[in-house]
Image (spheres, helix red, strand yellow):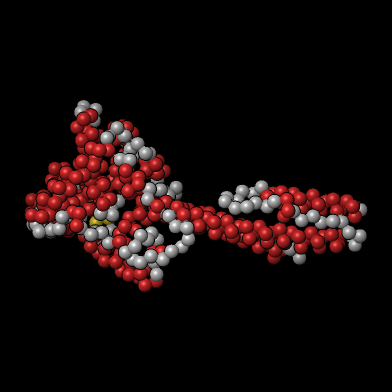
Amino acid sequence: MSRKQVGIIVFYTLLGILLYLSYTPVVGLMQLSNDDVLLIESKDNGSALVTKSEDIELKETRNQRINLLKIKADTIRTSALKLGGLSKPKIFNYEGNWCIAAQDLSKEDQAYAYNQYLDWLKKKEMGPLSYVNNNLVSDNMQNYLQMDVKTLQDAAFGGDLGALRALASGVNDEISRALSYKAAQRLTAIGEWDAGISTLVIDDLSEAEFIMDEDATKAQQHIVRALSYAEIAFQQASTAGLSSLLIVLKDSPQLQRLMSRIDESLVEGSVSRLIADIDKTRLAEGLRPFEEMTVPRVALSVFQQSIAKMYDEGGNAEFLRLLQDKTLFPGYWQVQYLDTPCIKRRIATREANFHLIPAIQEEIRSLQNQFDTVP
């Protein structure tokens, strides 16, 4: 083979590689231009010299590609920050508008936030959950499973919080829905949002589904109340109401259609009335009114993290579809609870850390391994 033929083969080989690299999508970054193409001219030194030149330039081209990939990864990280309203990383104090503790807080405030998180968990801890009579109950409710309804009711409304949770969860087949609902209302009034509101939301939606063919107006009233309790939970940094909404809605297209016709102003008015009812109970028992109940700053971060996880494409596809359906829930929920800058940032950060950046890192490793195999 002549030197001219070798030169032509080398030229088209390099051109093919560079064209491939140039047209590989790199989101938000510059791509290789014609100025990046390195041409190897045929010399009178023999084919061995041409092969050596090809190796050098291939390494240079791969090195350029690695640098571009590193820039791409940095751009993805920066894009996540921008979705959260930041142009660059910033350190906040604990009471500030931070989103992700590991990124936004000093080491000291991270430790403080973690301790606050543990304290918050202790106050709302129900223990590991398991199914009993098709209801989720915690291990510390096991002592109440064999109690007769009268004894359980007396204990629950006599100040035994475990009994009250067990009653609201319906651990005994003899517990009526009305009694379970009353216990859940009591839990909600004293601030046990997760245990109380889950039962209230599920009960109201179930009742709406049961009667909607006979009395659509009354069914809508139950839906409004379910949405209202879910919003009360939002205001206390709890996703219990939303989770319960999704669980019931995913199996009921008819209920979804009925909910999509609810006027959001009805929900706003219902929330106000329910909070007023809650305050009557709280004030009568010497408890602070609802609006004065403080939510630990770390609880807000955990709440937004929980919402972001619901949007994870690796989760329940039907839940994701419901969350993205803008007709189901009150419109103002999007801005206030479901689509905040922090949630957008968490979703983007999660996608970057678990999917996009690992793929880039794998591509970089592959290119570096090619270096190792080139003589």
Relative depth, front residue between 189 and 263? 263
As drawn, which residue projects farthest toward the top?
A: 214
Which residue is at a point 81% across and 56% down the rendered structure image? 40
Which residue is at a point 25% across and 38% down the rendered structure image? 265
Place of residue 120 in the rendered image (x, y in percent of width and height, measured from the top left):
26, 63
Q: Quadrant of the C terminus?
A: bottom right
Place of residue 175 in the rendered image (x, y in percent of width and height, measured from the top left):
14, 46
Place of residue 202 in the rendered image (x, y in percent of width and height, measured from the top left):
24, 43
Relative depth, front residue between 160 and 188? 188
As drawn, which residue projects farthest toward the bottom?
A: 108
Quadrant of the rendered structure where residue 53 is? bottom right
Quadrant of the rendered structure where residue 38 is? bottom right
Q: Is residue 327 left or right of residue 183?
A: right
Q: Is residue 287 visible?
A: yes
As drawn, which residue projects farthest toward the front?
A: 87
Which residue is at a point 79% across and 49% down the rendered structure image? 12
Quadrant of the rendered structure where residue 251 is? top left
Q: Is residue 186 visible?
A: no
Place of residue 337 in the rendered image (x, y in percent of width and height, measured from the top left):
33, 49
Relative depth, front residue between 306 and 98? 98
The tally of labels here is: 0
Which residue is at a point 23% across and 62% down the rendered structure image? 123
